[in-house]
């Protein structure tokens, strides 16, 4: 895929532009050369992405942990298949040496592999309260998680944020850095086509990547950042 063919936003598994049609230039930081144009997302575009992730969450949270794990390990395989292209794009707009970005892409695949293996091993606890009582906890997903990427090493930040959130049954909205959106956008598109049939619909919906310099409209505050917490435990007796 050429730079010109890259999507500016991927929402609900579909390439879409900003609703107002505005775009901005992406530059090669080493030369200042204009290399691509991508949509400049506004609050209404972010709202579209959040709604797509909420819609996907209704089904994804009930997808079996084994299927979630298979999807994440499938993403890892896809990353390795596309490693050359991803590294080239990450180096082009991020300004990092190509070997460094190649190592980032491999680390990204390993994150998805790791959390793919962990997906069916997230458990709760049985609390001993004495004879005649059964008290146990089960972990529940939060919902929609927001991930805001930096311009440096965005691949690893995607993986260490999105992969554990997805493994636990959450859905994700990712904002790529406007200075370096090309690699994450290509990664998102590749991941949206990596799903096994049983998980294809939620997988295509969770990966929404608005590239925005504006502020999103108020929404329930989701967990995000580099290390999502384990799903909250619910006690049942």
Image: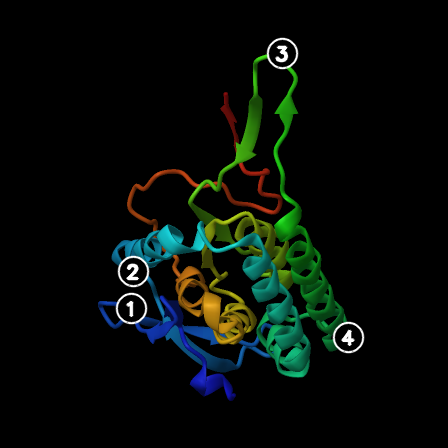
Q: Earlier in the sequence, mark 1 or mark 3?
A: 1
182 left or right of 40 in image:
right
Q: CA distance from mark 4 to mark 3?
A: 61 Å
Q: Earlier in the sequence, mark 3 or mark 2?
A: 2
- The residue positioned farthest toward the front in the image shown: 132
Q: Tell me residue 217's x, y (percent).
A: 28, 46
Which residue is denoted by mark 3 in the rendering? 131
Q: Earlier in the sequence, mark 1 or mark 2?
A: 1
Q: Earlier in the sequence, mark 2 or mark 4?
A: 2
Q: Do residues under tags 1 and 3 come within 8 Å of each other at their CB atoms?
A: no
SS at mark 2 in the image = helix
SS at mark 1 in the image = loop
Q: Earlier in the sequence, mark 4 or mark 1?
A: 1
Q: Nearer the viewer, mark 3 or mark 2?
A: 3
Q: CA distance from mark 1 to mark 3?
A: 61 Å
Q: Tell me residue 40's x, y (percent).
A: 34, 66
Which residue is denoted by mark 1 in the rendering? 18
153 left or right of 236 in image:
right
Q: Do residues under tags 2 and 4 come within 8 Å of each other at their CB atoms?
A: no
Compare residues 177 and 172 and report the one nearer the observer. 172
Residue at 49% in and 38% down: 140
Q: Earlier in the sequence, mark 4 or mark 3?
A: 4
222 versus 69 height, above or below = above
- The local crowd at label 1, few if under 14, some if 14 to 19, many if 20 or more residues have their Cα within 10 Å, is many
- The local crowd at label 4, few if under 14, some if 14 to 19, many if 20 or more residues have their Cα within 10 Å, is few
Which residue is denoted by mark 2 in the rendering? 45
């Amino acid at each position: 895929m050429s730079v010109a063919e890259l999507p500016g936003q991927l929402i609900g598994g579909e390439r879409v532009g900003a609703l107002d049609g505005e775009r901005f230039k992406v530059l090669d930081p080493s030369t200042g050369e204009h290399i691509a144009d991508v949509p400049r997302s506004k609050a209404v575009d972010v709202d579209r992405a959040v709604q797509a992730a909420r819609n996907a969450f209704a089904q994804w949270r009930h997808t079996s942990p084994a299927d979630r794990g298979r999807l994440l390990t499938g993403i890892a395989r896809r990353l390795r298949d596309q490693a050359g292209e991803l590294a080239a794009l990450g180096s082009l707009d991020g300004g990092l040496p190509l070997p460094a970005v190649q190592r980032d892409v491999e680390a990204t695949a390993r994150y998805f592999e790791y959390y793919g293996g962990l997906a069916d091993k997230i458990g709760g606890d049985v609390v001993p309260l004495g004879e005649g009582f059964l008290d146990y906890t089960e972990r529940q997903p939060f919902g929609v998680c927001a991930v805001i990427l930096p311009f440096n090493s965005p691949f690893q930040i995607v993986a260490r944020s999105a992969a554990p959130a997805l493994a636990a049954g959450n859905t994700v909205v990712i904002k790529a850095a406007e200075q370096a959106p090309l690699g994450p956008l290509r990664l998102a598109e590749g991941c949206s086509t990596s799903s096994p049939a049983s998980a294809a619909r939620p997988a295509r919906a969770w990966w929404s990547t608005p590239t925005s310099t504006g502020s999103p409209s108020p929404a329930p505050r989701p967990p995000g950042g580099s290390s999502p917490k384990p799903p909250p435990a619910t006690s049942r007796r």
